[in-house]
Amino acid sequence: MPWAEAEYTRETATTWLTFVHQSWQSHTAYSYAITHKNHLIGATALERRIGPGGLEIGYWLHPDQVGTGYATEAAAALVQAAFSLPDIEFVQIWHDLANVRSGAVPKRLGFAEVARHEPPREPLSPGEVGVDVVWQLDRPVG
């Protein structure tokens, strides 16, 4: 996750916010802040990058907030939002195999592991092993 850097400058923030705004305008991604007691603790998004009928959920939390349940809560809200759209048939979550905590989120929400990809689709970040694990939840019937 190159964007989750320790040195987060004003320039980095401006670049990120510009990207987020453009993504909303082009309907390619819908990013949200994760806050707690009026403090920014992370971010989450629905992204249209896995093909027709699907949306991908991404999330990131400040290291002090990992293990609090906020990522699971945010992902659950995005699952509901995704399935409120008539053209969405499935939702996926991708993470590096080494990121066990990130993998716990889709497991808790009832996603099934559907694939592993090697090499990964994005450059490696520190601590990653280069295997993308893909989880999927299909639209409930009825």
Image (cartoon, rainbow, N blue to C red):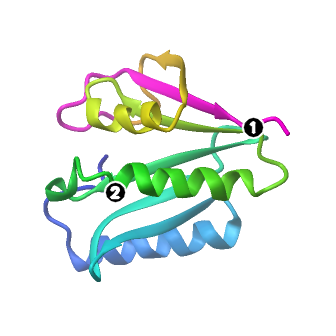
Residue pointed to by mark 1: 140
Q: Of callouts 2 and 1, which one flags the residue occurring earlier in the amino acid sequence? A: 2
> Could you tell me residue 72's position as x and y percent?
40, 48
Q: Amino acid at mark 2?
A: Tyr
22 to 106, vertically: above or below: below
| Residue 99, label in figure | none
Q: CA distance from mark 2 to mark 1?
A: 24 Å
On whether residue 127 falls in the magenta region, the answer is yes
> Could you tell me residue 44's position as x and y percent?
44, 58
Is residue 5 left or right of 28 when viewed as pictured? Answer: left
Which quarter of the figure has residue 77?
bottom right
Residue at 22% over, 47% down? 67
What range is drawn magenta here?
A: 123-142
On whether residue 3 falls in the magenta region, the answer is no
Q: Amino acid at mark 1?
A: Pro
| Residue 70, label in figure | 2
Is residue 2 left or right of 24 when viewed as pictured? Answer: left
> Could you tell me residue 112's position as x and y percent?
55, 23
Residue at 33% over, 73% down? 35
Query: What is the secondary structure assignment of the residue under circle 2?
Result: helix
Is residue 26 left or right of 102 when viewed as pictured? Answer: right
Which quarter of the figure has residue 6?
bottom left
